[in-house]
Amino acid sequence: MTPRDKPLFRWASYPLVRPVLGLIIGILVGENTQIGLAFSLGILTAFVVAYFGLHFLVKATSKTRFSWLHLLTLLGVFVALGMSLVANINPKERLLHIKTISQNNQKTVLAYQGKIVSEIQEREKSYKFEFEIEKIRTEKTWQLAEGKVLVYLKKNEFLNDTSFINNTDKIYNFGDELLIKGSPILTNPPENPSSFDYQKYLKYHYIWHQDFINSYDVVLVNNQNNTEIQSNLSILQQFRKKAIDFRIYSDSILKETMPSKQSYGVASALFLGIRDGLDNEVKDAYRSAGATHVLAVSGLHVGILSAMVAFFLGFLKKHKKSKYLYLSFILSILFGYAFLTGLSPSVLRASAMFALIQIGQTFSRRSTIYNNLAFSAIILLLFSPYMIFEVGFQLSYLAVLGIVLIQPKLAKVYTPPNKIIKYLWELLTVSVAAQLITFPICLYYFHQLPTYFWLSGFVVIPAAIVILYGAIAVILSSFLSMTISCFLGVILSWIIQTVNYLVFGIERLPVSVLENIRVSFAESMLLYALMVGLFCFFVLPKRIFFYFSLLCSLLFFGINLYKNLDAENQKRLVFYQIRKGFALSLQEGRRSVTLLDSASFYNKNAQSYWLTGDLLSNGKTENKLINLDSIYTENENYQEGNEIVQIRDWNGGKIILWSNKTILLWNKRLEKETKFLPKLDNIEMVWISNNPIYTLAELKDIKTKYIIFDDTNYSSRIKLLSNEAKVNKISTVILKNGAFQKEYK
């Protein structure tokens, strides 16, 4: 058989690959169609009956003839299973879920009781934790309920913040049972176009509600730190509580023993997954150098531990009896590390993935890495189907697949002359293989591409190994002697400072990162299709794969050409929803100008949250920010090298001229001496900000199409004026309800 006639992929060798593909398809179908549980279970039952019917009723001599039908029914079973798993999560299918109770039964929740099921995270003005509801109080009585709420507990303004919750003596801890006054509210969809969908993010973590409470709204029912009170936690929850307590202890040891605050932040993020100690300078440097994955505890760190165990104890796998001892060692280390990190979901997922791979290799002689990956994915998705939507899950499996599939072929391109160069070459090919297979989805999620990722790999991957084991040594030695622990902490701090110096050096290299790359989900899938076609063509050169790759390339560039032409001809206006502020983006072609209040102008993090995604999705490559509060034009045109917008002073605010449109910003009370308003015609919009008027009668000489109320106005004033506008048949836009956008030809 010639290479051209050789089959590219033998499905029989990978029996678990098809079921996991069917399960993923079923989860995606179930999430996007919202099919009910009863209907999904009906489909599942039908396919199960059909599968076993074919298996037992068709004669053995005829099975090859019906093998394709047998395969379809098997895929149908897993597709229906995925749909059923998603339907089972839906609150509509759960009669005791608080969302179902409050909506279907139209009951008002006055209070709710349950327990804290996550580590408490400190924020600037509040404490954040996940809360699992056990029962609710309605107008009539208490009743059983379920559901998770993301709770923000406001800091007590009359007490020192650090005395309220601290690492050594928390008032509230994981597992504490609380009684909370009030009713949790449903999470809201994104208020601004193309911004991060926090509602969907929480949904994929099984959270549909959130609540903002004060300290006087909470009653502590059961304190887990009180040994005299019987714990209400399950065995697994008690185990997780101990893991979280140990994680907090480990973080305090690193903080105490490492003299450099910046080094402590890196060590805590890399080893424990606690990123609160990282400053923005370090985050930006690692992001630009393509080393952010090192600061997010996940598959890389668990893979390092797994590789080191295999390196030192791999000889045990060669013997039939000792291989089970090896399996015990590696499972203990993997889940021991997950315990050290507080059993965080990302580490637990990665540990489970590698553990299932090791179990598959130990118990199955015909085991392959592809079957082991598929087996681990099936188990994880059966346990938590929404895990498929997590970026960490996607990147972990893609990176491992890239290393297994692509790295060996890259390694054969060059034969190193000695062991040192061989190690460096393998390190390079691993980095390139992982980056190559993950870059389409990274472009979709993060909109940037680090160009020196291959160089940073020589630094951060060996450093991650040293820092990982160094942090373990610092924490474990603290049980023997704090002197030894402090000594090791100083050494670890020096190592991290050296690594940071090298990472900062890579960041300063020219064109270290390609930013503001907009790639849609469809485009990222086309890139993956292109990669698959090219891979198949080089492994098994057939014209069909070349033509397929060419078609994917044409489609990708065709979509980009259409988007670019659309962006060039675009004229668009967007009022963003900003809490207690305002932002107006005027977009024309590739350029845009955004007018902001002072607080929003200096808040770069907030801008990246609600502005960057919208500009990228609409192809804006040039954006100018203007602090509207600081402009005093004295009746002169404000341009400052930008011809898109002109701004003039007006007695009650400012007049904004853009694309033959006039927008009147009214944000100041008129002086008492002003007897009348100048007559203003052809005003596109009157933008009301900062409560300047009490009645629409003050607008009698201004003719406009829209009245815009931003979030700086009182809600009661907005309601009064909008009702008045409705009577006068004037269109109103209330930005408290979400952004307003309008396109012009």
Image (cartoon, rainbow, N blue to C red):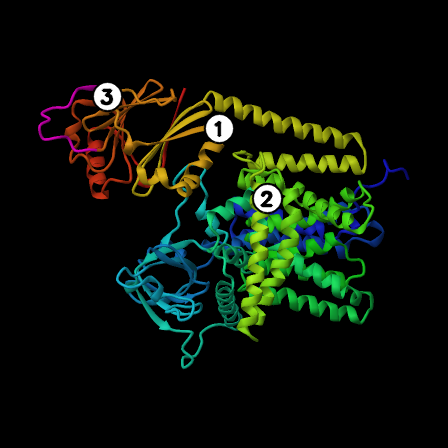
* Of the image marks 3 and 2, the number of the one nearer the N terminus: 2
Q: x, y percentage for residue 365?
A: 81, 61
Badge 3 amino acid: Asn
Question: Regarding mark 2 in the picture, which secondary structure is present there?
Answer: loop
Q: Is residue 194 above or below residue 308?
A: above
Instruction: Check whether the beta carbons of the residues at disc 1 and disc 2 lie within 8 A of each other.
Output: no
Q: How crowded is mark 1: few (under 14 residues within 10 Å), some or many (20 or more)?
A: some
**Mark 1 and mark 2: Cα distance apart in space:** 23 Å
**Mark 1 and mark 3: Cα distance apart in space:** 30 Å
**Mark 3 and mark 2: Cα distance apart in space:** 49 Å
Report which residue position mark 1 lands on. Answer: 621
Specify the segment rendered in magenta.
668-680
Report which residue position mark 2 lands on. Answer: 290
Q: Residue at x 71, y 50 (%)?
A: 17
**Residue nearest the observer in this picture, 72 or 598:** 598
Q: Residue at x 33, y 62 (%)?
A: 161
* Of the image marks 1 and 3, the number of the one nearer the N terminus: 1
Q: How crowded is mark 2: few (under 14 residues within 10 Å), some or many (20 or more)?
A: many
Q: x, y percentage for residue 225?
A: 42, 75
* Of the image marks 1 and 2, the number of the one nearer the N terminus: 2
Badge 1 amino acid: Thr
Residue 681 visible in the picture: yes
Instruction: Check whether the beta carbons of the residues at disc 1 and disc 3 lie within 8 A of each other.
Output: no
Badge 2 amino acid: Gly
Q: Which quadrant holds residue 630?
A: top left
The secondary structure that most of the magenta stretch takes on is loop
Q: Does the magenta stretch include residue 697?
A: no
Q: Residues within 10 Å of mark 3 (few under 14, many from 20)?
A: few
Report which residue position mark 3 lands on. Answer: 635
Q: x, y percentage for residue 423?
A: 75, 50
